[in-house]
Image (cartoon, rainbow, N blue to C red):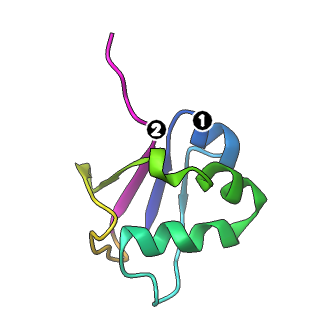
Amino acid sequence: MKILYFAWLRTTIGKSTEEITPPETVKTVSDLLDWMPSLGENYSSALEKRDLLRIAINQEYADPEHVIKPGDEVALFPPVTGG
């Protein structure tokens, strides 16, 4: 699964993209966000306010209960504002 990080998430985690293989118990976006802090302190810090995050799966906005698959592209980013 390819994960993309944007804005302060990229800065806090320390990378813009990575390939990960979550355990089989990770079935939804919510499961993924629950599991990712186990990857390290930088993930814990970046994801501690996960209610502020927006998630896209394969370039489509997704809710926390969206089912994810191993080949999906998951993008994590803060709310986007216009101006």
Q: Position of residue 11 (x, y in %)?
A: 66, 37
Secondary structure, mark 1, is helix
Q: Say whether residue 3 is left or right of residue 62.
A: right
Mark 2 crowd level (few <14, some 14–19, many ≥20, 10 Å Cα): some
Q: Residue at x 60, y 35 (%)?
A: 8
* Mark 1 in CB contact with mark 2 (< 8 angstroms): yes
Q: Mark 2 or mark 1, which is nearer the start of the sequence?
A: 1
Mark 1 crowd level (few <14, some 14–19, many ≥20, 10 Å Cα): few
Residue type, mark 2 in image: Pro
Range shown magenta: 72-83
Residue 79 lies in the magenta-colored region: yes
Q: Residue at x 30, y 71 (%)?
A: 65
Which disc is residue 18 wearing?
none
Which disc is residue 78 wearing?
2
Instruction: Identify the residue under disc 1.
Output: 8
Q: Position of residue 63 (x, y in %)?
A: 28, 60
Residue 43 lies in the magenta-colored region: no
Judged from this view, the residue extending furthest toward the bottom is 24
* Res 30 → quadrant: bottom left
Judged from this view, the residue extending furthest toward the left is 60
Q: Position of residue 74 (x, y in %)?
A: 39, 58
Q: Say whether residue 43 is left or right of residue 27.
A: right
* Res 43 → quadrant: bottom right
Q: Residue at x 56, y 44 (%)?
A: 16
Q: Position of residue 29 (x, y in %)?
A: 38, 68
